[in-house]
Amino acid sequence: MNIGEKLFELRKQKNLSQEEVAEKLNVTRQTVSKWETNQSTPDFDKIIPLCELFGIGAEELLNAKKPEEKPKEEQNNKQEESQKTLTKEEVKMKSAEVVSTSVFIYIAAVAFLMVTIPVLRINPIVASAIFLCLIAWSTARIIKHYMSVPKFEKTKEEKKEEKIIKQINGIIGTICTVIYFIISFATMAWHITWVIFIIDGLICQIVKLFFMLSEKEEEDEK
């Protein structure tokens, strides 16, 4: 039993209110409340009056243990662990949302570039600038999201899935690079063929989104 609990118990035994104790000790009721809730401890000059009021010895009161405080680091670790447990599913849902909307922006940017220059006859420089802004915005959303979300210890299934995604994206990247050089040398349209790398990034994000949705469906079925 700590000091606060001891004072609370002694006050109840004497059938006294906090106001009555405060009046006898010449302190405020809030002070008595803080003593009993361990927000503070009685000053040295209040120990003897407290003992006389409750009819106990100073040794008995002072031997009451102060509430043990866990190390701050341990408290933070437990708080973080609790937060991770509560928010892991929310983070997954948010990741799926960010990736899916970013994929949509990528597709919209490519479609915009394909339509505005040859069909709508918009200045190529203006169209390209808008296209790059859309791509940059979409990419920034993905980077910001994955830099801000908490990190979780990955399960074996998640590690395996991540490895598969990297392998698939590596294959896609290699294929897109080969296609880029073939088309570029064949058409000499180097000023536009770099869009293939944007398409490469788009496909990689679609692959990631596909695995996210598959994992969500499996969890829903369990």
Image (cartoon, rainbow, N blue to C red):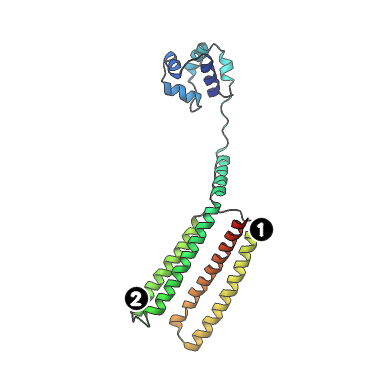
> Crowdedness of circle 1 by 10 Å Cα count: few (<14), some, many (20+)?
few
Towards the viewer: 82 or 43: 82
Towards the viewer: 149 or 209: 209
Q: Which mark is residue 126?
A: 2
What's the amino acid at mark 2? Val
Q: Earlier in the sequence, mark 2 or mark 1?
A: 2
Residue at the (54%, 70%) spot, across then down:
204
Residue at the (62%, 70%) spot, across then down:
167
- Image quadrant in which the C terminus is located: bottom right
Q: Position of residue 154 (x, y in %)?
A: 62, 56
Q: Specify whether 62 is left or right of 110.
A: right
> Crowdedness of circle 2 by 10 Å Cα count: few (<14), some, many (20+)?
few
* Residue 171: quadrant of the picture: bottom right
Towards the viewer: 162 or 51: 162
Q: Position of residue 92 (x, y in %)?
A: 54, 57
What's the amino acid at mark 1? Lys
* Residue 130: quadrant of the picture: bottom left
Q: Position of residue 104 (x, y in %)?
A: 46, 68
Image position of 133 with respect to 34: above or below: below
Image position of 37 with respect to 192: above or below: above
Q: Which residue is mark 1?
A: 156
Image position of 134 with respect to 95: above or below: below
For label 2, the SS is helix
Q: Specify whether 155 is left or right of 183.
A: right
Q: Report the residue that reaches farthest toward the bottom.
A: 186
Q: Report the residue that reaches farthest toward the front.
A: 221
Residue at the (55%, 23%) spot, across then down:
5
